[in-house]
Image: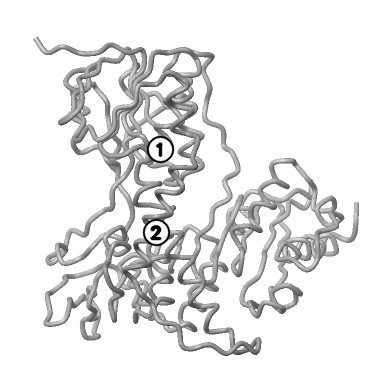
Amino acid sequence: MTSFRQFDVVVIGAGPAGTAAALRAGDLGAKTALITRDAFGGMAANDGPIPVRVLAHAARLARDARQLAQYGISVEQPALDYTRLVQRARDVVGEARSHSTLLEQVKNAGVELVEHAGTVEFADAHTICSASGPTLRGTRIVICSGGVSRTLGVPGAELTVTPADAFSLTAVPKSMIVIGAGATGAQVASIFNALGSSVTICQAGPRIIESEDAEISDAVAAAFREDGIAIHQGFGAIERIDAGANGAAVTLAGAPRQPLKAELVVCAIGWRAGIDALKLERAGVKTNAHGFIEVDELLRTSAPHVYAAGDVIGRSMLVPPAVRDGFIAGNNAAASQPMTVRADLEPIGSFTDPEYAKVGLTEERARARYDAVVSRAAYAETTRPIIDGRTRGFCKVVIDRNTRKLLGCHIVGERAVEVAQMAAIAMTGGMTVDTIARVPLSFPTYANVFGRAALRAVRLLGGYS
């Protein structure tokens, strides 16, 4: 008989959701184990947001270098050493890990960490076995195994690479086709365009970054085209991908044009739950029609002793909500006072050029539910963007005419992600647009574009209430 180690709670996956779940369960006194296929931190630390932000910063520096002459600074033409850039990304990951207190907190909470366990699966409803780790048995289980890139189901799909593969190249390709223009695809396209690739985006739907407010999507598309990125959208589907002498050729379904050719084709059509190897049926855990784990408001699965959080449930494939949901799942698995998932405000943005960000409702959704008033302020009328030569973009606020509170804020332009945090705080605090407009923001800053939009909204509402 195989021996096992008994725990109150076993958490599968040590990314943001799993770490939060294990830490919460441990803090509540539950005997907890945290098991992960690879290193502590998961994709977010090792292959995701942290290294990608390094490449995005390099793209920003390359863009800034092209602006130096406008400010009277003469330098030789910068040259990119992509190998060194990738090494810098690895160094930053290591530095972030060394300065993070999460690992120390997890250990101080009494959580037993099992790293590099390899493939993890359910042996039965309560038992977790792995390729290289010990067999663990948990009274309750929390699944936080993350997500993986979706693949195309067309001939030649094997010729594509994932975004993670693209960010691990040893050289920047001369040309690149990015299939899919959600947040990840748009970021891949923007970064490699800034680093010197000739980039083409293929978006089957009617517009890129479709989850954003329509005006933001249109503005980002216009800026991409201005920067030399070709965009094909609304064509329906990819028909096939063929190998070529110098890369691959992508044929769009029903398109009269010639196949699109590039050295590298990146498939960025979204994420699916990373549950292929778990053998969920052995625990009685069901998935929905989209392949994500079904959970209730307590983040409990169809098996009452199993909870799930993060990318595996497919609600919001981002770090902040993953941490929140991991905390709730760990809390509930540790049999504490039950907590439910609240509809928290989630400021979301992407480090493209230009950046874009949002919090709250789009204009379309707001008008369907409220008597909404919309106000805009352009970067080109705001002092700091003028100083920095970053005048592309605008800030758009959506206000409830009756309560005068923010329903949403949408921004495209320099430092948009940072500006969105201000809107999120104002909305969380229930501030009216009158209160926001009275805040004496530091000058000149990018935050002034938000203040200007708020002040303009007050005027549209007939003045201060």
Residue 310: mark in rendering? 1
Residue 417, relative to residue 178: is it above or below? above
Q: Position of residue 329 (x, y in %)?
A: 44, 25
Comparing 71 with 370, the one in front is: 71
The quadrant where residue 179 appears: bottom left
The quadrant where residue 173 appears: bottom left
Classify residue 289 as left or right of residue 389: left
In the rendered image, the quadrant that contains the N terminus is top left
Q: Position of residue 34 (x, y in %)?
A: 34, 26
Residue at 39% of width from left, 23% of height from top?
Answer: 300
Residue at 47% of width from left, 33% of height from top?
Answer: 325
Amino acid at dot 1: Gly
Residue 89: mark in rendering? 2
Classify residue 164 as left or right of residue 250: right
Amino acid at dot 2: Ala
Q: Position of residue 433 (x, y in %)?
A: 80, 53
Residue 353: mark in rendering? none
